[in-house]
Image (cartoon, grey):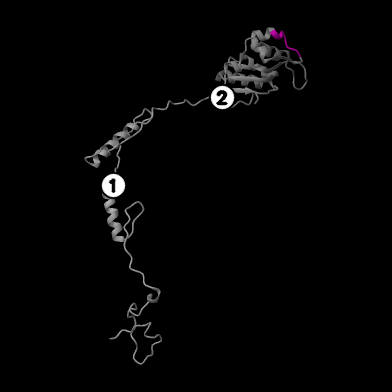
Amino acid sequence: MGYLSPPPSPAPVVVYKDVGGLVSDYEAQTEQYRRENREVRLHECRSACTLALSLPNVCVYPDAQVKFHQAYNALTREVDLGISSKLFASYPAAVQARLGYLTREYRVLSGRELIALGMRNCEGDNPVLIASRRQRQAPAASVASAAPTANPSSWGDIASKVQSAVASALSGPEAQPSGSIRVAVADRERIDARVTSDAVARSEAPIGALRVDVPLPPRRPPSEAFTTNDAQPRFSQIPGSQPILSAKFVRLETR
């Protein structure tokens, strides 16, 4: 990311590598950062980018490289002493004293040198913050119990005990019940009686209910598996017709 291509405000401007350019462009961008009080963080900054050192909210990384040199005309390649003087005057006094003057060749100051001269350390003043989830202390375990008495007066008493026990278990600091708790308790005796009566009526027993065995009729020997007495009168013979099956298998209905 360069000095002239900042992220949307108010995010800090992190200069990874900027090789400089027209001094007028950098002067305008520097004044905008000054008005916005934007933070500028320098990694590698050359030439006109060094105007960033004039900002009140600028910092350098310890491994940063800041390179200074005289300004020159882009067409004639001749040094512009007026613009070079403006660049040099923009630097902090300690940096000016260290440089002494600007030359046509680069003079490099590292981030550690600039920090020693009083520039702000990006790493020292901007520590990395790691968000961690706060561990909540688990509330004391509550066990809900509703032991029936030896001779309970009614199922309503047991329901009341269960309701009180559940409400006590949920009354910790992390889970306050917002309303009353309703607990349904089944009447086992009524259920057993109803299941038993239904099973007898249908000759079957559902899962978990009382099984009722209904006696089956006695089995016949194989020789008497089918007799003429079992055949029900189903057909009437048409007058003048001949039966296909013998009377052993068909029992005619007389009218």
The residue at the point 29 percent across, 55 percent down is 196
Determine if the magenta segment contains residue 42: no
Picture quarter with the N terminus: top right
The residue at the point 28 percent across, 47 percent down is 188
Quick check: 31 left or right of 133? right
- Residue under label 2: 11
The amino acid type found where label 2 is placed reads: Ala
Q: Secondary structure at mark 1?
A: helix
Q: Report if the CB atoms under discs 2 and 1 are less than 8 Å apart.
A: no
Determine if the magenta segment contains residue 101: yes
Where does residue 217 sit, x and y in percent of width and height?
33, 68
Query: For residue 122, what is the image quadrant?
Result: top right
User: What span is colored magenta in the figure?
Assistant: 98-103
Task: Name the chief secondary structure element in magenta.
Answer: loop
Where does residue 64 sit, x and y in percent of width and height?
67, 18
The residue at the point 37 percent across, 76 percent down is 224
Which comes sooner in the sequence, label 2 or label 1?
A: 2
Picture quarter with the C terminus: bottom left
Q: Secondary structure at mark 2?
A: loop
Where does residue 81 sit, x and y in percent of width and height?
73, 13
- Residue under label 1: 188
The amino acid type found where label 1 is placed reads: Arg
Query: For residue 151, what is the image quadrant?
Result: top left
